[in-house]
Amino acid sequence: MADLATFALYLVPLGLIVAAYLWRRRRWSALHARELQAAVEAGLTEPTSLHPVVDPNRCIGSSSCVKACPEGAIGVINGKAQLVNAAVCIGHGACAAACPLEAIKLVFGTERRGIDIPNVKPNFETNVPGIFIAGELGGMGLIRKAAEQGRQAIASIRQADRSGTDLDVVIVGAGPAGIAAGLGAIQRRMKYVVLEQEDSLGGTVYHYPRNKIAMTAPMQLPIVGKVKFGEIQKEALLDFWSRVVRRTKLRIRFNEPMEAIERSGRGFRVRTTRGAYDAGAVLLAIGRRGTPRKLGVPGEEQPKVVYRLIDAEQYRGKRVLVVGGGDSALEAALAISEQPGAKAALSYRGDSFGRVKPKNRERLDAAAAKHRIELLLGSSIVEIGAADVTLRRGDRTWTLPNDVVIVCAGGVLPTDLLKKVGIEFETQHGTV
Ligand SMILES: Cc1cc2nc3c(=O)[nH]c(=O)nc-3n(C[C@H](O)[C@H](O)[C@H](O)COP(=O)(O)OP(=O)(O)OC[C@H]3O[C@@H](n4cnc5c(N)ncnc54)[C@H](O)[C@@H]3O)c2cc1C
Ligand code: SF4
């Protein structure tokens, strides 16, 4: 009898612990299944770049990957880990590092969507001698890795003695890789120029959602030394870089996209929208967001046409047409519709918004129902006038009074431009 009591004393609490564990596991599994379902319904199942694939034969559903992922991208369903929210995965690899059974590998592309990765040597030189690639364009994302690669690529360029008559190096892009490379060029007393297509510093970081916490490991920046961030708010990181640029007098030519690279003498001629630069080497630090896709319609060259929403408040009292069918287009239209006196319209070629977050779609439907946004589905832009825009739907064309056009049609990687100068790419389809 005493034995039975002792047995129960241990067995009952143990049973309760196991029951609580199984209940929690089932609850999380259901939650992750719902997240996956929502992503499937929104058409957001393709990761943008590097992402995990899980070997189901090795995975024991330990959930270490779920705890390690700072973006909430991975979940465990029915005891097996899987990418449940592919759109937010940024390829940290924290999930893979946390897995006790090494069941997770990081890959590029998927079966359905191949990703072009350039062939880059360990010294960051491409197959074209003199053209180097650092940062996310080469396949490896993350702030620290991009900055490290920018620093090391400049060292390689210096070592290879690719000095040019005019410039030693043209650095394209002012994200983490380009900034670190520029600092390296100053430190090594190289003749350089940094070209940036936008008017802002920081590359992709500048476009993170407001107040996003970026996770980054310590990194070594030329001139600045070791920087230990850990977790840092986007705005604070951008502020840090602005101070570094000011203090080191790093010269960046903003609003100057690179448009072509040609061979010239012993080096290259880099053509931009404003001129051309001759250099012994080119360092491409352009990331993978690409250059904003244009509509290619008459009138698009006017200053009233922009390719991203910076500050919705500047559109108070204005008639704004947003063009696009993704989350950034919906978010821009919604932000403008909240401005006093603004008239927001949203034009999209498709008949419905397939690949957007359900929350954005709900907010859009509500705004359209209250006539705060004019929804122009199935429409395309024919021409942009000074005070209006001509649209077409089927055989019908009509004119909409307009002050500003915001085109949110995604970005185009300059792959063709780079292939033209001889850079080789490999299309990867998510195989380990
Ligand atoms: C939402 C989100 C969250 C993230 N969170 C984190 C995080 O927490 N921690 C982390 O480590 N990483 C994070 N990342 C990834 C990280 O931001 C990127 O890996 C990193 O910024 C890559 O740096 P880069 O310098 O290679 O490219 P980018 O930062 O993309 O910079 C490239 C620059 O080149 C410019 N450019 C492009 N084409 C041209 C051209 N033709 N001419 C001139 N300039 C050009 C672009 O305008 C841009 O400024 C996140 C990414 C996203 C999308
Ligand atoms: S790669 Fe990073 S963001 Fe993607 S699932 Fe793993 S930890 Fe999360």
Image (spheres, grey):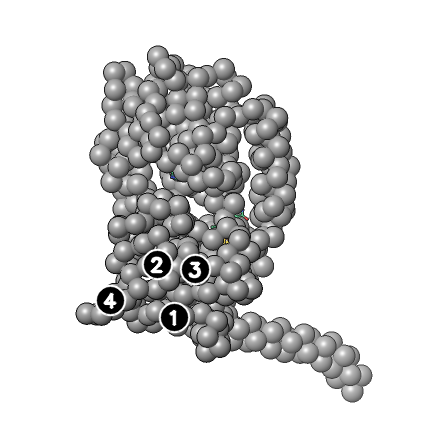
The picture places residue 361, in percent across and down from the top left corner, at 44, 71
- The answer to the question of whether label 1 and label 4 lie on touching residues, with beta carbons closer than 8 A, is no
Q: Of the residues shown, which amino acid type is indicated by label 1?
A: Leu
Q: Of the residues shown, which amino acid type is indicated by label 3?
A: Val
Q: Which residue is drawn at 46% across and 65% down?
A: 343
Quarter containing the N terminus: bottom right
Nearer to us of marks 1 and 2 is 2
Element under disc 2: strand
Nearer to us of marks 4 and 2 is 2
Examine the image and state in which quarter residue 130 appears. Answer: top left
For disc 2, the marked residue is: 388
For disc 1, the marked residue is: 375
Residue 273 visible, this orientation: yes
The picture places residue 266, in percent across and down from the top left corner, at 27, 16
Q: In this view, does 170 lie above or below 292?
A: above
Residue sitting farthest toward the right: 2
In the image, taking residue 36 as reference, residue 392 lies left or right, namely: left
**Res 320 label:** 3
Task: Give the alpha-carbon distance from disc 1 to disc 2, as whole Å.
Answer: 17 Å
Residue sitting farthest toward the top: 165
For disc 4, the marked residue is: 397
